[in-house]
Image: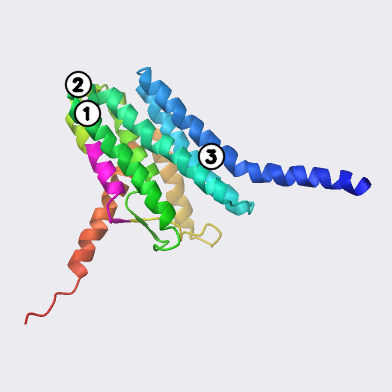
C-alpha cells in the first residue's frame, strides 16, 4: 500500500509533463480561434496580433516536447490541426473580412487558395518529415505565411489604410503566400542553429539590437522580416539556377 502511494505523485508528475507541450498547442489553437472571432467583429489589429501570438506558442510546443522527452504521435497530429486553424483559416478569414468582401468571387477564391495551400503544406510536411533536408523547408512554412498576411493587415491598419483601398495588393500577397507554401522552393529552417554552442560577443549584440528594433515598431518590423524571409527562398532558387552547370552542346 505504501509503495502504491509513493508511485501516485510520480505518475501524476509524469502526466503533467506529458501534457505540457499540448497545453502550448491548445494555447496556439485558442489564439487562432480568437483571431477568427476578432476578424468577424472587425477588430483586425487584435486578430493580427493573436496570429503572431499563436506563432510564438506553436514554436514553443515542439521545443518543450523535446526538452521534456514527451514527443508523441498524438502531439504531432494535434499540432497540425491547431496550425490549420491558426495559420490557415484565421489568416484567410482575416484577409477576407478586411479587404476581400467587395471583390466577390475573386475575394473568396483568393482566400481559399491560401487556406488550401496551408492544408496541402501541412499534409506534405507530415508525410515528408523523415525525407527532406532538415536544413530547409520545402515550401514556405505556414506560420511564416500567416505572419506575412497578418503583418500586412497590422501594419497597413496602423498606417490608417483600410482594406478596400489595398484589396488588390492584399489579394496578390495572399495568393503569393498560398502558392509559396505548396511550391518546391526551399526556405532555410534555422534548425541547425545550436543555442548551446558558444557564440561571439557580436552575435549577442546583434540579437539585442534585433529585439530593440522590433520593440520600436512591431507591425512594420515584423512584416518586413517575414516579407524578406518569404522572398529569400526565391533568391536562393535564382542563385541555384545561376550556379547550375551548363550542359555541353552536342
Instruction: Say which quadrant the C terminus sits in.
Output: bottom left
Q: In the picture provided, is 84 more to the left or to the right than 231?
A: right
Q: In the picture provided, is 173 more to the left or to the right than 92?
A: left
Query: Is residue 177 magenta-colored?
Result: yes
8 or 197, which is in the foreground? 8
**Residue plotted at (26% across, 38% down):** 113
**Residue plotted at (63% across, 42% down):** 20
Instruction: Say which quadrant the N terminus sits in.
Output: top right
Res 21 visible:
yes
Res 154 visible:
no
User: Magenta-highlighted stretch: main secondary structure?
Assistant: helix
Span of residues in magenta: 173-186
Q: Which residue is mark 1?
A: 107
Query: Is residue 23 magenta-colored?
Result: no
Whole-percent x, y for residue 164 in the image = 20, 22
Q: Bin the neighbour count of mark 3 within 10 Å (Cα to Cα): few under 14, some 14-19, many 20 and up.
A: many
Estimate the spatial distance between the alpha carbons at disc 3 and disc 1, rounded to whole Å.
30 Å
**Residue plotted at (32% across, 37% down):** 115
Whole-percent x, y for residue 99 in the image = 24, 25
The label shown at residue 25 is 3
Q: Earlier in the sequence, mark 2 or mark 3?
A: 3
Q: Which residue is mark 2?
A: 102
Judged from this view, the residue extending furthest toward the top is: 41
Badges 1 and 2: C-beta atoms under 8 Å apart?
yes
Estimate the spatial distance between the alpha carbons at disc 1 and disc 2, rounded to whole Å.
7 Å
Task: Establish if 10 lies above or below 45.
Answer: below
Disc 3 element: helix
Disc 2 element: helix
Where residue 143 sits, quadrant-wise, is: top left
Disc 1 element: helix
Q: Bin the neighbour count of mark 2 within 10 Å (Cα to Cα): few under 14, some 14-19, many 20 and up.
A: some
Amino acid at each position: 500500500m505504501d509503495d502504491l502511494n509513493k508511485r501516485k505523485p510520480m505518475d501524476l508528475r509524469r502526466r503533467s509533463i506529458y501534457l505540457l507541450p499540448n497545453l502550448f498547442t491548445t494555447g496556439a489553437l485558442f489564439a487562432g480561434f480568437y483571431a477568427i472571432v476578432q476578424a468577424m467583429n472587425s477588430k483586425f489589429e487584435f486578430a493580427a496580433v493573436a496570429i503572431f501570438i499563436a506563432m510564438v506558442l506553436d514554436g514553443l510546443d515542439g521545443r518543450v516536447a523535446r526538452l521534456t522527452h514527451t514527443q508523441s504521435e498524438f502531439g504531432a497530429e494535434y499540432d497540425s490541426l491547431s496550425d490549420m486553424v491558426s495559420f490557415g483559416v484565421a489568416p484567410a478569414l482575416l484577409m477576407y473580412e478586411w479587404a476581400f468582401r467587395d471583390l466577390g468571387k475573386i475575394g473568396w477564391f483568393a482566400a481559399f487558395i491560401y487556406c488550401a495551400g496551408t492544408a496541402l503544406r501541412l499534409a506534405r510536411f507530415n508525410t515528408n518529415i523523415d525525407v527532406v533536408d532538415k536544413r530547409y523547408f520545402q515550401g514556405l512554412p505556414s506560420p511564416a505565411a500567416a505572419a506575412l498576411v497578418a503583418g500586412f493587415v497590422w501594419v497597413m491598419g496602423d498606417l490608417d489604410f483600410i482594406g478596400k483601398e489595398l484589396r488588390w495588393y492584399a489579394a496578390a500577397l495572399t495568393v503569393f503566400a498560398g502558392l509559396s507554401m505548396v511550391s518546391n522552393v526551399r526556405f532555410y529552417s534555422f534548425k541547425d542553429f545550436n543555442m548551446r554552442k558558444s557564440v561571439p560577443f557580436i552575435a549577442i549584440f546583434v540579437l539585442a539590437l534585433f529585439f530593440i528594433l522590433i520593440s520600436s515598431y512591431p507591425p512594420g518590423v515584423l512584416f518586413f522580416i517575414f516579407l524578406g524571409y518569404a522572398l529569400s527562398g526565391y533568391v536562393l532558387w535564382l542563385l541555384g539556377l545561376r550556379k547550375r552547370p551548363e550542359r555541353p552542346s552536342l
